[in-house]
Image: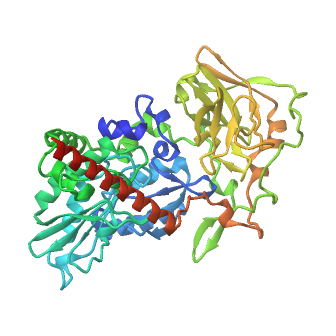
Amino acid sequence: SGTVLASLVNDMILTDGRDGLQDTNDRSLANMQRGGSYSVVPRVPGGEITPAQLIALGVTAEKYGLYSKITGAQRVDLFGAAKHQLPDIWEDLGKVGFESGHAYGKALRTVKSCVGSTWCRYGVQDSVSFAVRVENRYKGVRSPHKMKSGVSGCVRECAEAQGKDFGMIATENGYNLFLGGNGAVNPVHATLFATDIDEDTVIKYLDRYIMYYILTAERLERTAPWQAKLPSGKNGGGPIEHLREVIIEDSLGICDELDRRMAHLVDTYRDEWADVVADPAKRAKFKQFVNTDEIVPREDMIEFVNMRGQRRPAHWPKDGQPQTNWKAPSEEDIFARSEKSWVSVGRVSDFSPNVGSPVLYGNTQLAVFNNQRRGEWYCTQNMCPHKQAFVLSQGIIGDTAGQPKVACPLHKKQFGLRDGKQLDAENGLQILTFPVKIEGEEVLVELPSVEEIDGVLGTAGLRVLKSDCIDIAEDALKVPFRSKQERLKDILEEGEKIISAQLSRNATGSLL
């Protein structure tokens, strides 16, 4: 819902309590990676980057110990940043002109380009300049799903524009515009929409196409499946003919509105990371712990190993091996007989509504949840027992059958916030919970002594070490796979629907 609102209103997603509408990655303005660290992906419009920016990326990666990799979309990805480091990293990168690449959002990712006529002897148009123009126009525009684009300088198609949500291929007279393609699990070849059109016309058509998609697609629906479901054109030309009628002929009478809405999104663009860097209140949202400036380094939570001259987190051990599926030393309330006290962990204003916030008590990381929707507060361990990653405070809170819960952002395991039991598995894992009360503006948690709780939940004792027994495939989030036969069946069924609808319309027309 946060992305849907952002695509229409375009306010900053972290202000006015909108944090709680976002998933983990949008809330952090970065993608969480294995081990709970984050990636940094600056925008590189059209893949064009200056020597100063390349140097800045190298200096930043060295300064913060980040793993560097060129992405498939002509960008540089820096891995391994702790969340609290992100504002400092982006402050450094902003000094050489880098902006957020929105790799974390359902938004435009990149506009890939070849070098075009600038350098290539085959190029017939300046594909780099046009790619930069397109990317800078639509950067930050949120949509039902991510969008990718490409601009090729000739028919050799080095930018793979026909495999993108929208792509342009240069001709001697302008560009051919293709719509509705994607790679991913089920690749779709984009469909030719218009030929030999100039850059301004491409932009006009794209404004309307993207806005039509934003307003009518389902949540998390890419342009390809959305486009395939559109009605056929008047002459039975399928969805692409319908799009030509809507976008070029204004058959629905909405082009002015589409133009106006897109102009609003373009005019109200702001670099989200520049906003955070310049605003102390937003910057405070990235503190590692609400109640202290003390830092627990990433290496204290998971071992980092060398790989081809760079550092990466050790692979998680296979499920069932040591350092996985953690359980408290006792199935009973381990602190039932402990002497406890009410410990202040911050003020109410320190805890954003409807999200979790990490706090540090001794060497123990806890997660405090301000569930403003229910008027309730909870406190749990911050460590997800599945892989001993300290990430539960970054999870999404919700409820199942009235039971408040948090979903771990790594593997989506769900835990009740009242009793700590895993909700999505029988005889599953369990997390420890602690009572919370509010006195005036103080948030208090009932806790045993530091020595006792550190003996069970202390970070030092739960650090994940390199293991010789790993199962990378099992640890990965599962992506549903559909066979070629299943995809073909869907295409045939969709085609039958279109033909049936067209025959019905023809019959109705003949009766009239």
Residue 287 image position (x, y, % from top left): 54, 41
At 18% from the left and 80% from the top, the residue drawn is 123
Residue 423 image position (x, y, % from top left): 71, 38
Name the colouring of the figure.
rainbow
Residue 174 image position (x, y, % from top left): 11, 69
Say left or right for 439 vs 457.
left
Residues 366 and 485: in front is: 485
The quarter holding residue 253 reads top left
Q: Number of callouts in the render?
A: 0
At 69% from the left and 31% from the top, the residue drawn is 417
Say left or right for 337 vs 502.
right
At 77% from the left and 36% from the top, the residue drawn is 432
Q: Is residue 101 visible?
A: no
At 23% from the left and 51% from the top, the residue drawn is 209
Q: Please determine whether, in this image, residue 183 is positioned above or below residue 11.
A: below
Say left or right for 412 vs 226.
right
Q: Which quadrant would the C terminus be assigned to in this image?
A: top left
Residues 199 and 30: in front is: 199
Residues 381 and 170: in front is: 170
Q: Is residue 57 visible?
A: yes
Q: Please determine whether, in this image, residue 413 is positioned above or below residue 39.
A: above
Residue 310 image position (x, y, % from top left): 57, 71
Considering every residue shown, the one lying at the far front of the view is: 511
Say left or right for 477 vs 283.
right
Q: Which quadrant would the N terminus be assigned to in this image?
A: top left
Considering every residue shown, the one lying at the far top of the view is: 440
The quarter holding residue 76 reads bottom left
